[in-house]
Each structure stands twice: as structure tokens, then as C-alpha cells.
Amino acid sequence: MLSWALAFLIIAIIAGALGLSGIAGAATNIAWILFVVGLILAVIFMITGRRPPV
């Protein structure tokens, strides 16, 4: 999940540098949402003691 957030963040940075403010804003919002969801899941798994599959 955090890798998707990083990918959308990179897309937002590139779009912002090219002047595509609409795409940059949308990609930034998606990256922020995925980052927050990933952090929430990480905290839940840390509290419950679950480990990700290897």
C-alpha cells in the first residue's frame, strides 16, 4: 500500500513540475489517502501482533 502511495506521489511531483495542476492535485490526494490507510493498517497489525506473509 505504501508503495502505491509513493508511486502516486512521484506522479504528482512530475505532473506539478510540468504544470499539470489538476493531475498533480488528484495524484497528491490519492497518495495521501493511500499513505494514511497504510499507516493505519500498520498500526493495527502492530497492535494485534499479526505478521505479513513472507
Image (cartoon, rainbow, N blue to C red):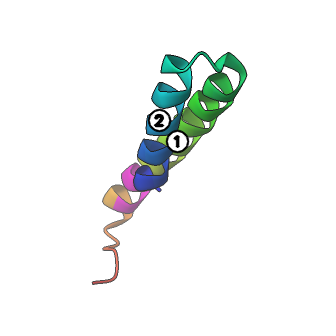
Instruction: Tell me which residue sits at (27%, 84%) in the image.
Output: 54
What residue occupies the far right of the structure in this picture? Answer: 22
Identified by mark 1, the residue type is Phe
Q: Which residue is located at x 55 percent, y 45 percent?
A: 34
Q: Residue at the location (62% across, 38% down)? A: 30
Q: Tell me if 16 is positioned left or right of 54 in this view.
A: right
Q: Is residue 5 visible?
A: yes
- The residue lying furthest to the bottom in this view is 54
Can you tell which quarter of the image residue 3 is in? bottom left
Q: Please name the residue that numbered disc 1 is placed on.
A: 8
Task: Answer whether labels 1 and 2 touch (C-beta < 8 Å).
Answer: yes
Q: Is residue 10 above or below residue 24?
A: below
Residue 21 position, x and y percent, is: 66, 17
Q: Is residue 40 left or right of residue 49?
A: right
Specify few, some or many for label 1: CA neighbours under 10 Å numbering under 14, 14-19, or 20 or more. Answer: many
Q: Quadrant of residue 22?
A: top right
Which numbered tag is attached to residue 9?
2
What amino acid is labelled 2 in the image? Answer: Leu
Question: What's the residue at 47%, 56% (across, down)?
Answer: 1
Foreground of the two, 43 or 19: 19
Name the spot of residue 40 as percent of width and height, x first: 47, 46
Q: Residue 10 at what x, y percent from top left?
A: 44, 37
Magenta stretch: give its range.
40-45
